[in-house]
Image (cartoon, rainbow, N blue to C red):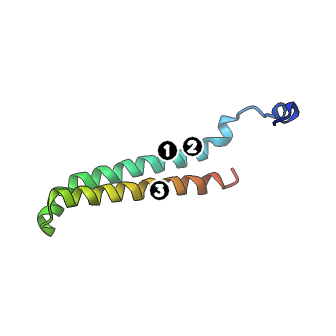
């Protein structure tokens, strides 16, 4: 059970203090989206060069997207651990 004293110790949110953190997180999200977009446009030449089927490419893209999801969450956690 949470005591009322613990709830009274809140500090007001200071946006200026968190601007570097927000900039890092937004730039990471932008790079992730850009990376996935570039991969999607590169898939047809990759399919032709490696002579692989569409279903194989779909599985590879799915695995790549899951990897990006896990890495972006891990990087976000590491950034939040930094003292800003």
Tell me whether circle 2 and circle 1 mark residues in contact (CB < 8 Å).
yes
Residue bearing the label numbered 3: 70
Instruction: Rate crowding at label 2 as few (under 14), some (14 to 19) or many (20 or more) other CA atoms within 10 Å.
Output: few
Q: CA distance from mark 2 to mark 1?
A: 6 Å
Query: How far from the left and from the top, in percent, is residue 9?
Result: 84, 35
Direction front: furthest residue: 1
Residue 15, compared with residue 24, is above or below; it is above
Q: CA distance from mark 3 to mark 1?
A: 16 Å
Residue at the (21%, 61%) spot, across then down: 56
Instruction: Rate crowding at label 3 as few (under 14), some (14 to 19) or many (20 or more) other CA atoms within 10 Å.
Output: few
The nearer-to-camera label among 3 and 1 is 3
Left or right? Give the position of 35 relative to 16.
left
Query: How far from the left and from the top, in percent, is residue 53?
Result: 14, 61
Residue at the (47%, 58%) spot, across then down: 71
Q: Secondary structure at mark 3?
A: helix
Which of the marked residues, 3 or 1, is nearer the chain's N terminus?
A: 1
- The residue lying toward the viewer, choosing from 31 and 51, is 51
Instruction: Specify the label residue 22 is tagged with.
Output: 2
Which of the marked residues, 2 or 3, is nearer the chain's N terminus?
A: 2
In the picture, the quarter occupied by the N terminus is top right
Residue 50, compared with residue 83, is above or below; it is below
Q: Secondary structure at mark 1?
A: helix
Residue 19, compared with residue 68, is above or below; it is above
Instruction: Specify the label residue 26 is tagged with.
Output: 1
Q: Secondary structure at mark 2?
A: helix
Direction right: furthest residue: 5
Q: Quadrant of residue 6?
A: top right
Tell me whether circle 3 and circle 1 mark residues in contact (CB < 8 Å).
no
The nearer-to-camera label among 2 and 3 is 3
Query: How far from the left and from the top, in percent, is residue 18?
Result: 64, 42
Left or right? Give the position of 18 relative to 46.
right
């Amino acid at each position: 059970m949470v005591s009322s004293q613990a709830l009274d110790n809140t500090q007001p949110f200071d946006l200026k203090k968190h601007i570097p953190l927000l900039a890092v997180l937004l730039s990471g999200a932008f790079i992730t989206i850009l990376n996935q977009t570039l991969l999607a446009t590169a898939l047809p030449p990759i399919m032709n060069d490696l002579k692989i089927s569409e279903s194989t490419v779909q599985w590879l893209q799915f695995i790549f997207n899951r990897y990006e999801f896990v890495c972006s969450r891990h990087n976000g956690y590491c950034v939040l651990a930094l003292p800003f």
